[in-house]
Image: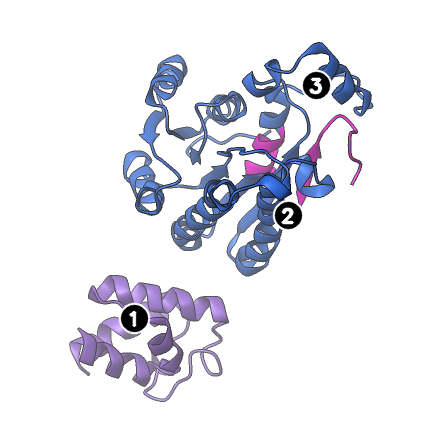
Amino acid sequence: MSDIAERVKKIVVEHLGVEAEKVTENASFIDDLGADSLDTVELVMAFEEEFGIEIPDDAAETIQTFGDAVSFISKAA
Amino acid sequence: MFDLTGKCALVTGASGGIGAEIARALHGAGATVGLSGTRVEPLEALAAELGGRAHVLACNLSAPDEVEALVKRAAEAMGAVDVLVNNAGITRDGLAMRMSDDDWQAVIDVNLTAAFRLCRAAIRGMMKARWGRIVNISSVVGQTGNAGQVNYAASKAGLVGLSKSLAAEVASRGITVNCVAPGFIETAMTDKLNETQRAGILGAVPAGRMGTPAEIAAAVLYLASAEAGYVTGATLHVNGGMAMV
């Protein structure tokens, strides 16, 4: 797993309080990992901080799964 | 009861009569306070009076850049912003038919838009901390209306709607958002009234007197406390019975 994926996973695990093995490529933050809409905003803010990037709102809406987050950040960072 | 030891509170409009008293009350309960306002001199004087745990943070709330930066500056100075009190407000009174767009916009910008920007900036840290208190100072006229104050009344009613909506968004994170709505309070503003005006106002107040800044500050202190954790989206009216809502 790439360094970016590891860092994203750490944020997701810490923030949502889920087990690391549940955070798979296709795991949806809301449907599989129990996030509410506020959690997704907080996750995006945490990603922005961790990677020093800006994630615009329309892009944030496309980040539904762990895999989405990793691929978006890999391109942006 | 109402111990704010270890909490950091940012108070806007702390150079004014009510704002200064709010800062004193929060400070008296143990909080570190960030004193914001446009006039530095009274802020410095208040900080000197309070002694430790007081930081002067001058800010012009009409300037969007300064507003955006204020919460960050406050967090850097104090370590966090656990409590935000949006108290700053201006008036540009006039009958609606004669009110300029500038007078309308200036009041909305400072009283409502700046408060929104400060809320938006402050909840970031509060969400992480899973604790926060926002108290917006509304006004009785936001509820009752007042001839000559369409802009001011709209801004103060706007704060109530803002507070309820934000309260719903962040309640699950231990953050409460409430309003205090003062009636007529003894301040430099009301000192200017003549006897006839005073008598007219007091005739509408069942308590038969104006309120004191300390009575507003006590309401803010309650809403900022841990004890008020289950109160959110509420407006606490402090008006001597002038409007029972």
**Mark 2 vs 3, N-terminal side:** 3
What span is colored magenta in the figure? B219-245
Q: Which chain is purple in the rendering?
A: A
Task: Examine the image and state in which quarter residue B60 appears.
Answer: top left
Work out how far the residue at label 3 is from the one at label 1, CA to CA, in angstroms.
51 Å
Instruction: Please say if the residues under marks 2 and 1 sit with CB atoms less than 8 Å apart.
Output: no
Q: Are marks 2 and 1 on the same chain?
A: no
Q: Nearer the viewer, mark 3 or mark 1?
A: 3
Q: Which residue is mark 3?
A: B210
Residue B219 % position (x, y): 63, 31
Amino acid at the residue labelled 3: Met
Q: What residue appears at the point 33 percent right and 30 percent down from the top-left corner?
A: B58
Q: Residues within 10 Å of mark 2 (few under 14, many from 20)?
A: few
Looking at the rendered image, the quarter that the N terminus of chain B falls into is: top right
Query: Which mark lies nearer to you, 2 or 1?
Result: 1
Q: Chain ID for label 2?
A: B
- Vertical comparison of B42 with B55: above or below: above
Please state which amino acid type lies under the numbered disc 1.
Ile
Residue drawn at x 27%, y 73% is: A8
| Residue B230, disc | 2
Disc 2, SS: loop
Q: Amino acid at mark 2?
A: Tyr
Give x and y (percent) for residue B165: 59, 57
